[in-house]
Image (tube, rainbow, N blue to C red):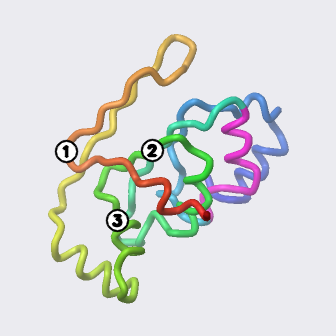
């Protein structure tokens, strides 16, 4: 769902019904995959755990999207290596960074597995293969 769809959801649903313990990040972490207030609604009780699946050919997740998401989650997992941290840590253009990254990485993906109890609470998480956690502090303003 894109920004307009999330804005509609926020206006149609009681914010308490959007509280979440786990969120699958929409649109691969793009800047259009959320609406203002969405992550606040998700984290009304506690910050949720989130997972995203990057879309390498579209350079997603975006830095803007991650800067919006990371302060609102307690953990963010991805099925691929921490691509955005690589982009931000290099003193080169985004295009050059992506070309370099693609040449050095294999095309394998990892798996994020999440287990929930009967109340829908996240009780276990397993990362395998190239799956990893994104370093939240990299995207949270000081």
| Pointer 2 residue | 51
For the residue carrying disc 3, how many other residues have a C-alpha within 10 Å: few (<14), some (14-19), or many (20+)? Answer: some
Dominant secondary structure of the magenta stretch? Answer: loop
Are the residues at dot 1 and dot 2 in contact (C-beta closer than 8 Å)? Answer: no
Q: Which residue matches tag 1?
A: 129
Q: Secondary structure at mark 1?
A: loop
| Residue found 47% across the figure and 57% down from its top | 28
| Span colored in magenta | 32-44
The quarter of the picture where residue 44 lies is: top right
Give the residue pinned by disc 3: 83
Of pointers 1 and 2, the one earlier in the residue sequence: 2
Locate residue 50 relative to residue 41 in the image: left or right: left
Label 3 element class: helix
Q: Mark 2: few, some, or many residues within 10 Å (few <14, many ≥20)? A: many
The residue at 83%/40% (across/down) is 12
In the image, residue 119 lies in the stretch drawn in magenta? no
Q: CA distance from mark 2 to mark 3?
A: 14 Å
Q: Is residue 82 left or right of residue 4?
A: left
Q: Report the Cα–Cα distance between label 1 and label 3.
A: 15 Å
- Residue 1 image offset from top left, x and y in percent: 61, 52
Q: Quadrant of the C terminus?
A: bottom right
Q: Is residue 142 above or below residue 110?
A: below
* Residue 89 or residue 3, whichever sits in front: 89
């Amino acid at each position: 769902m894109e920004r307009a769809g999330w804005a509609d959801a926020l206006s149609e649903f009681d914010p308490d019904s959007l509280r979440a313990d786990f969120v699958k990040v929409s649109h691969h972490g793009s800047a259009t995959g959320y609406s203002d207030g969405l992550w606040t609604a998700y984290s009304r009780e506690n910050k949720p755990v989130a997972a995203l699946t990057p879309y390498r050919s579209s350079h997603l997740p975006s830095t803007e999207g991650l800067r919006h998401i990371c302060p609102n989650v307690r953990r963010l997992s991805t099925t691929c290596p921490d691509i955005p941290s690589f982009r931000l840590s290099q003193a080169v253009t985004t295009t050059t960074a992506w070309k370099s990254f693609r040449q050095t990485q294999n095309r394998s993906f990892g798996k994020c597995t999440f287990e929930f109890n009967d109340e829908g609470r996240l009780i276990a998480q397993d990362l395998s293969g190239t799956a990893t956690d994104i370093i939240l502090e990299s995207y949270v303003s000081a």
